[in-house]
Image (cartoon, helix red, strand yellow):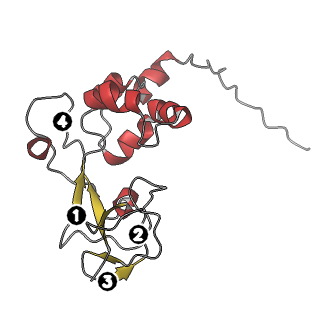
Amino acid sequence: YADVLVMNWREMTDSNLVHYDARPVKERFTIAAPIECGINHHVKCFVHNGINNISFNDPHCPNAPQLRGVNVLGDEVEQKPLQPSIIHTVARIDHYDTKTAEEWVNIKQRRGTCSGDEVTKQKRAVNVEYFFSLNERTTEKEHILGVRTTNEETAKKPTKKSKPKTAKKAVSKE
């Protein structure tokens, strides 16, 4: 018997889509990030129905060390929002964090993270590197996210004109 089931996320990529379309997310986003991706250590905890008076310091795990937590294999684990093992074989929660570049800009950056504080919202709004840590970086996505591409940055930087090299005359010691 367990009080809490601890289940890993499986982070989904943008599946190389750039713009929103009305299909359900499970149809649009079918490519998962590599299993070793750090965010896959995150979990959601499911508390047995009927257990009352539990608080949550974190939106993913209860603040209830007296409860017995197990992973999807039935192994006893600590109730922490990050787990050392990633288990996707038995059960998992597909996590659609980034979606498309267009959705990232229009929804995710404006909303911020689940903590909802202003500092977190500000960090999320400027942190497109997180988006690209999960998704392939393309010029089209960079444009939507308001990031200048490396080629554009290079093209706008003034180039240094080099002075022509003059041949040095050998000096003899005779």
**Which comes sooner in the sequence, label 4 or label 2?**
4
**Label 4 neighbourhood size at 10 Å, few (<14), some (14-19), many (20+)?**
some
Residue 103 seen anywhere in this rendered image of the structure: yes
**Which comes sooner in the sequence, label 3 or label 1?**
3
How far apart marks 2 and 1 lie (CA) works out to: 13 Å
Q: Which residue lies under the disc numbered 1?
A: 92
Q: Is residue 75 left or right of residue 146?
A: left
**Label 1 neighbourhood size at 10 Å, few (<14), some (14-19), many (20+)?**
some
Q: Is residue 75 left or right of residue 53?
A: left
Q: What's the residue type where badge 3 is placed?
A: Asp
**Label 2 neighbourhood size at 10 Å, few (<14), some (14-19), many (20+)?**
some
Q: Quadrant of residue 22?
A: top left
Task: Indicate the quadrant containing the C terminus: top left, top right, bottom left or bottom right.
Answer: top right
Name the secondary structure under disc 3: loop
Please report the residue visible at 19 percent of the width from the left and 27 percent of the height from the top: 19
Q: What's the residue type where badge 4 is placed?
A: Leu
**Which comes sooner in the sequence, label 2 or label 1?**
2
Q: Is residue 118 left or right of residue 50?
A: right
Name the secondary structure under disc 1: loop
**Which comes sooner in the sequence, label 4 or label 3?**
4
Q: Which residue lies under the disc numbered 3?
A: 75
Q: Position of residue 84 (x, y in %)?
A: 42, 72
Q: Quadrant of residue 143?
A: top left
**Label 3 neighbourhood size at 10 Å, few (<14), some (14-19), many (20+)?**
few
